[in-house]
Image: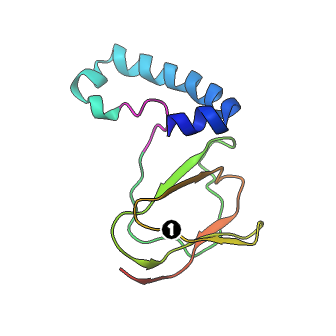
Amino acid sequence: MVKILKQYFPEQWARQERAYQRVRHFMKTRKILQDKPWLDFGGAFFAVAVKEGNSEIYHLDWSDDREALTWVTGLGTWKGGDLRLVELDVQVPMKEGEALCGCMRQLVHSGSPIVSG
């Protein structure tokens, strides 16, 4: 994911890398990474949220930084649950093992109903 950010979103990566250095310094000074090295995502992202199902209500992710990229991936086997982007009039199918990213504070979005899984 870091390679994708660097190559396709260089301005976003520069901003992300500055934030990563601050977070990494904080975690090192408190010896968090020493005990939990798996918390270091290399600057690609700083948090992981897990949700069962999806939100079928159009919304913006208000708690995200306005310029931050949100990565989304699905786990398991299912049908439906496509990402809907109302302003772009696009519905993006999500399959197991795929990931996508976008500025979800700027794009009104929802998931289509999950049919099975």
Disc 1, SS? loop
Taking the image as shown, residue 29 lies to the left or right of residue 10, namely left
Q: Which quadrant of the structure image shows residue 24? A: top left
Q: Residue at x 33, y 68 (%)?
A: 76
Taking the image as shown, residue 56 lies to the left or right of residue 34, namely right
Q: Position of residue 25 (x, y in %)?
A: 43, 16
Residue receiving disc 1: 94
In the image, the segment drawn in magenta is 40-47
Majority SS type along the magenta span: loop
Q: Residue at x 28, y 18 (%)?
A: 31
Q: Nearer the viewer, residue 56 or 71?
A: 71
Q: Which quadrant of the structure image shows residue 60? A: bottom right
Q: Residue at x 60, y 31 (%)?
A: 6
Q: Position of residue 62 (x, y in %)?
A: 63, 52
Mark 1 is on which residue type? Met
Q: Nearer the viewer, residue 76 or 25?
A: 76
**Neighbours of disc 1 within 10 Å: few (<14), some (14-19), many (20+):** some
